[in-house]
Structures are given as C-alpha cells and as structure tokens.
C-alpha cells in the first residue's frame, strides 16, 4: 500500500530531503551573486572630486557666458569623440591618460601638451569631457593650474550636461 502524505488543515505536507551544508552555502552564494553583482557593476565608475582648489567649477551656462567673453574651451576627450560632437567653438585637445583615477594622480604618467594652451597664463581656459566620471578634464585642469594658469575652469558636467540643455554643438 502506498504511503499517503500527511495533511494539515487541508494542505499536503511533504517532508523534504535533508540539505547538506555545502548545498546550502552554494545556494546562498548564488543568491548573493544575483543580488549584488548588478549593483557593484553600476557603481564601478570612480567619480571625480566635487571640488578642486585653485580651479573654478562651472556649469553649462557659465561655460557659454565665459566663451562669449573670449574663454577658450578645450574638449579633452579622445579625438574620435571630439570629432563626432563637441561644444561649438571648442578646441579638441586630447588628454592622454595613463595614471590612476584618483585626486592625487601621477601627472608624469599622462600626456598633455601645454603648448596648445594660450601663452597668456591669465587667459580663461575651460576643460571638459564626459561628466563627473570622466577624469580627463579634472586632470587637465590640475595640470594647467600647476603650470601657472590663473583662470582655470572645470566644466565637470561636460558634454552630457551641455547636450541635455540643447546648447550649440559642432
């Protein structure tokens, strides 16, 4: 005669086989991986600092106003990005980045030709790239400031902010 499962208040109650510690641990690891890997991947971008001593952090409106008064904006992204679309009137001048994405980066590992900046170190210069997770403009601003430029602007919002505001591009 076949054994009939016991019921409790009309619900069938089956006895589950014992779970080994190894299987339990494997299941917990699988759940943790599914739950936490997407969050870790989303936050793997290292954001630039929100302040930079000796440099004025500006928004799109301030960039547009400064360029209207003669400031030179430098798009320090790679040439392909700059040639595809940049701020109208900006100069493409790639910052070649090899150093770590940290505030105290080693400038000697990077390449940035200061000879392409204005000869007048009091001239207003603006550096931008692809927003707060792009370190090129931060580093270019630091290099210019450390080279003695006195009127350095860092457009931290970069191209995403500029295009979101519908401002002119080339």
Image (cartoon, rainbow, N blue to C red):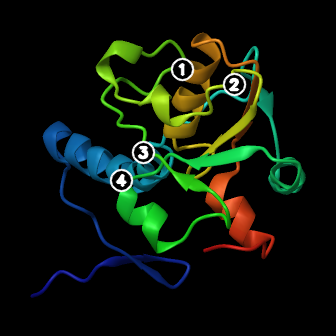
* Label 1: which secondary element: helix
Q: Nearer the viewer, residue 65 or 158?
A: 65
Q: Which of pointers 1 and 2 lies earlier in the amino acid sequence?
A: 2
Q: Nearer the viewer, residue 82 or 89?
A: 89
Is 159 above or below relative to 40?
below
Q: Residue under circle 1?
A: 143
Q: Residue under circle 2?
A: 120
Task: Judge the density around disc 3: few (<14), some (14-19), many (≥20) Cα neighbours within 10 Å.
Answer: many
Q: Which of pointers 1 and 3 lies earlier in the amino acid sequence?
A: 3
* Label 2: which secondary element: loop
Front disc: 4 or 1: 1
Check contact, mark 4 vs mark 1: CB within 8 A: no
Q: Which of pointers 4 and 3 lies earlier in the amino acid sequence?
A: 4
Task: Judge the density around disc 1: few (<14), some (14-19), many (≥20) Cα neighbours within 10 Å.
Answer: some
Looking at the picture, how far across and down is residue 100, in whole percent?
Answer: 37, 24
Q: Is residue 59 visible?
A: yes
Q: Which of pointers 2 and 3 lies earlier in the amino acid sequence?
A: 3
Q: Is residue 71 left or right of residue 118?
A: right
């Amino acid at each position: 005669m076949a054994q009939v499962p016991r019921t409790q208040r009309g619900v069938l109650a089956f006895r589950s086989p014992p779970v080994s510690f190894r299987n339990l641990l494997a299941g917990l690891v699988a759940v943790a991986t599914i739950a936490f890997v997407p969050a870790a991947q989303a936050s793997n971008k290292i954001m630039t600092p929100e302040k930079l001593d000796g440099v004025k952090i500006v928004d799109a409106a301030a960039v547009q106003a400064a360029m209207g008064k003669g400031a030179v904006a430098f798009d320090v992204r790679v040439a392909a990005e700059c040639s595809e679309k940049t701020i109208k009137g900006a100069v493409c001048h790639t910052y070649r980045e090899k150093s770590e994405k940290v505030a105290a980066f080693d400038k000697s590992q990077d390449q940035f030709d200061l000879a392409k900046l204005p000869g007048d170190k009091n001239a207003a210069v603006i550096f931008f790239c692809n927003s707060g997770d792009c370190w090129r403009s931060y580093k270019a601003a630091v290099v210019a400031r450390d080279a003695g430029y006195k009127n350095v602007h860092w457009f931290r919002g970069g191209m995403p902010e500029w295009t979101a505001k519908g401002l002119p591009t080339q």
